[in-house]
Amino acid sequence: MNPYLDLLRDILDNGVEKGDRTGTGTLSVFGRQYRHDLAAGFPLLTTKKLHFRSIANELLWFLRGDTNTRWLKDNGVSIWDEWATESGDLGPIYGAQWTAWPTDDGPVNQIDYVVETLRNNPDSRRILFHGWNVGFLPDEAMTPQDNVRAGRMALPPCHLLYQFYVAGGRLSSQLYIRSSDSFLGLPYNTASLALLTHLLAQQCDLQPGEIIVTTGDSHIYLNHLEQVRTQLAREPRPLPTLHLRRRPATIYDYSFEDFEVRGYDPHPPIPAPVAV
Ligand SMILES: Nc1nc(=O)c2c([nH]1)NC[C@@H]1CN(c3ccc(C(=O)N[C@@H](CCC(=O)O)C(=O)O)cc3)CN21
Ligand SMILES: O=c1ccn([C@H]2C[C@H](O)[C@@H](COP(=O)(O)O)O2)c(=O)[nH]1
């Protein structure tokens, strides 16, 4: 994943110091893009160990339409805890908008639409789903928990627009991330996009193609600078590969045990505080 490391270098070299909602401070650049051909391997960082269990279970949790941390906790994932209420609620975040976007005519499952369109009209230029539901955005002046209690999202979506493209029997995906915590969040978002592309490809009898990640406010938090330098001093290793152990009946029926990552030999993890 050299393009990812290039982005970190770009932010260190060209980033402007900016304040942010969390009070941490960032180095930030605006509008960047990288791509990765899934035929070249699964994009899990090798320059630090990533917790694939968290990444995969978070995606399965989105696909369940779940917005409470209970299921995540039961499956060993704690990455959403800081934003949840005492009862684990996060408001109508990703899973709710992906699978049950509310309309006057009832909830719309955008994932069903994507699967059906990939199967029946793969040349369509309208194969996308979106998370930015303006009716439920939080008030930036209130805490995530107070927003949830008011019926709003704990955080507005960061990875918010997923578009799909089929050519030559290959499925490619592009994701727009409006705000990207490039040290902690972006490796998760990239691997998650790759995994979703593998699942959709399997369900729709396609081969995984390219993933393209486009980032808006692309930042490194000031308390991640040491960690970024440590990571950039490491030599990347060969990428692992992903194998799907079975083909479940629908996109909603995968479980973590269906995923096998082969040949993952990363450098050690690099702990970093998450900005809340
Ligand atoms: N500041 C910030 N950055 C994010 O990336 C982020 C948020 N907030 N809020 C919502 C979600 C939660 N996400 C997170 C939160 C924590 C980690 C994190 O601490 N990762 C550690 C390992 C922790 C684990 O897997 O248990 C890492 O070293 O990658 C990653 C993504 C992504 N999102
Ligand atoms: O999937 C995710 C979720 C969140 N982030 C990061 C991006 C920002 O650093 C914060 C969100 O703060 P805002 O003030 O709402 O932009 O979380 C991410 O990178 N990936």
Image (cartoon, grey):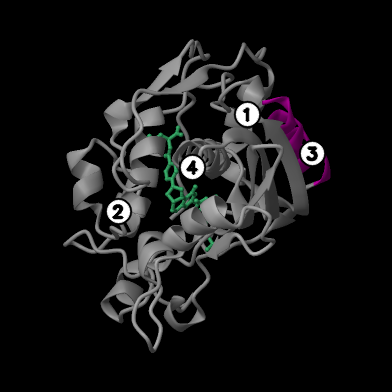
Q: Where is residue 168 in the image (x, y as percent from the top left)?
A: 71, 37
Q: Residue 240's x, y, as percent? A: 53, 16
Query: Marks 2 and 1, how far apart in space?
Result: 25 Å
- Of circles 3 and 2, the one toward us is 2
* Kind of residue at disc 1: Leu
Say the numbered circle drawn on residue 10.
3
At x 31%, y 37%, the residue is 248
**Within 8 Å of ligand 2, the CB of disc 1?**
no
Amino acid type at mark 4: Leu
From mark 3 to mark 4, how far is it between C-alphas? Answer: 27 Å
Query: Identity of the amino acid at label 3?
Result: Asp
Mark 2 or 1 closer to N-term? 1
Q: Residue 171 location, x and y as percent?
A: 62, 41
User: Where is ligand 1, by quadrant?
Assistant: top left
Question: Looking at the picture, does residue 1 appear above or below residue 224?
Answer: above
> Above or below — where is 66 with respect to 34?
below
Q: Quadrant of residue 176?
A: bottom right
Q: Where is residue 204 in the image (x, y as percent from the top left)?
A: 50, 43
Residue range corresponding to the magenta coloring? 1-14
